[in-house]
Image: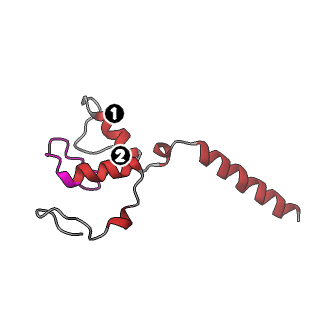
Amino acid sequence: MKKSLRLRAILLALVTVLSVLPMSALAANSSFTDVPENAWFYKPVTYMAENGYMSGTSGSKFSPHQTTTRAMFVTVLGRIAGVDQSQYKNTCTFRDVKKD
């Protein structure tokens, strides 16, 4: 019984500590190989990635000099607004964009 209570207390403490840590502290890699720390856009890129607004063009590249497409821009706006993207599958009405 005491072991069970102790285990619960430890788990509760762990959950409490993890809940107050910023998600960036838990991120495995919050930087991109093509975004040097001395670049003027390093902090904004890191902020956007750590908060899930932008994910880059691959697991290790952000492509900061690539042109932002309409789809990228709308995706970022939706993520910032907290839009449930699953509600918008196959609803695109733009002729130059695939339905999905």
**Can you give x and y, in whole percent of width and height, for residue 68 in the image?**
17, 47
Residue at horizontal 28%, vertical 45%?
32
Looking at the image, can residue 29 be seen? no
User: Disc 1 designates what residue?
Assistant: 43
Q: How crowded is mark 2: few (under 14 residues within 10 Å), some or many (20 or more)?
A: many
Residue drawn at x 24%, y 31% as measured from the top left: 39
Pick whichever, 16 or 3, lies toward us.
16
Q: Which residue is drawn at 25% across and 56% down?
A: 58
Magenta segment: 55-71
Rendered location of residue 9, percent (x, y): 78, 54
Displayed quadrant of residue 3? bottom right
Locate residue 12 relative to residue 73 in the image: left or right: right
Residue 21 left/right relative to 38:
right
Single out the residue that lies furthest toward the front: 93
Give the residue type at disc 1: Lys
Distance, label 2 to label 1, CA atoms, is 10 Å
Q: Is mark 1 on a helix, strand or loop?
A: helix
* Pointers 2 and 1 in contact (C-beta within 8 Å): no
The quadrant of the rendering that contains the C terminus is bottom left
Q: Which residue is drawn at 37% across and 39% down?
A: 47
- Disc 2 target residue: 49
Establish if 64 lies above or below 37. Answer: below
